[in-house]
C-alpha cells in the first residue's frame, strides 16, 4: 500500500533501483487487499491502489507454499525463489533479513532503497 501513502510510481522507482525485473504478487496478497479494499478511509483507498498495482503484476499461485499467514507465505516464496520483496512492514522486513532475503523499502518517504541482498 506504499505507493498510495507516499505517491510514488512504484514501477519507475523499481526500474531505477534494480533495472530489469518481473513484478509479481502472491494470489493470497491480492485476496487480502481485496478484503481491506472494502474498508472506508485511507486504509481502504490504499488497498484499492494496491489492487490496481497488483493487476499490473504476474499473480503467483501460492498453493505449494507452507500454510500460514500472508507474511509467512511471502517469506516462504521469497526464500524458495530468491526474490527481492518490496515492503515497509517492519516485522516482515525483519523476518526477510533473518532469512537473507533482500528488501526494498521507502527511504525518507521519497524513493525506494534496497536494504539487503
Image (cartoon, rainbow, N blue to C red):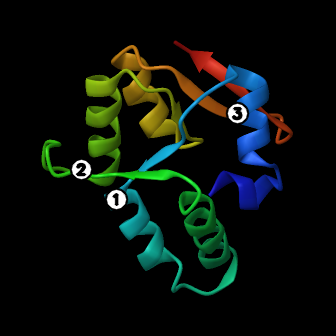
Rounded to the nearest whole Å, what is the CA distance between mark 1 and mark 2?
Answer: 6 Å
- Residue 111's spot in the image, x, y percent? 82, 35
Is residue 66 depicted above or below 7 in this figure?
A: above
> At 53% from the left edge and 78% from the top edge, which residue is drawn?
37
Label 3 sits on residue: 14
Residue 64, numbered label: none
**SS at circle 2:** loop
Q: Residue 64, relative to residue 39: is it above or below?
A: above
Using residue 95 as the reference point, say whether residue 12 is left or right of it: right
Do the numbered discs 1 and 2 sit on residues whose CB atoms are within 8 Å?
yes
- Precedes in sequence: disc 3 or disc 1: 3
Q: Nearer the viewer, residue 24 or 29?
A: 24
Residue 83 in picture, x, y percent from top left: 43, 26
- Circle on res. 27: 1
Label 1: few (<14), some or many (≥20) within 10 Å? Answer: some
Gap in angstroms between the C-alphas marked 3 and 2: 23 Å
Residue at horizontal 70 percent and vertical 22 percent from the top: 19
Q: Position of residue 96 (x, y in %)?
A: 40, 26
Secondary structure under tag 3 reads: helix
Q: Secondary structure at mark 1?
A: helix
Q: Please give the name of the residue rendered at 54% of the width and 26% of the height, measured from the top-left corner.
A: 103
Amino acid at each position: 500500500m506504499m505507493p498510495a501513502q507516499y505517491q510514488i510510481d512504484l514501477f519507475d522507482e523499481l526500474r531505477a533501483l534494480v533495472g530489469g525485473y518481473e513484478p509479481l504478487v502472491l494470489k493470497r496478497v491480492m485476496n487480502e487487499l481485496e478484503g481491506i479494499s472494502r474498508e472506508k478511509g485511507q486504509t481502504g483507498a490504499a488497498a484499492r491502489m494496491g489492487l490496481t498495482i497488483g493487476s499490473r503484476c504476474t499473480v503467483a499461485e501460492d498453493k505449494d507454499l507452507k500454510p500460514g499467514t500472508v507474511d509467512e507465505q511471502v517469506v516462504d516464496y521469497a526464500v524458495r525463489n530468491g526474490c527481492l520483496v518490496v515492503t515497509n512492514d517492519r516485522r516482515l522486513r525483519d523476518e526477510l533479513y533473518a532469512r537473507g532475503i533482500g528488501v526494498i523499502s521507502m527511504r525518507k518517504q521519497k524513493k525506494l532503497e534496497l536494504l539487503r541482498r
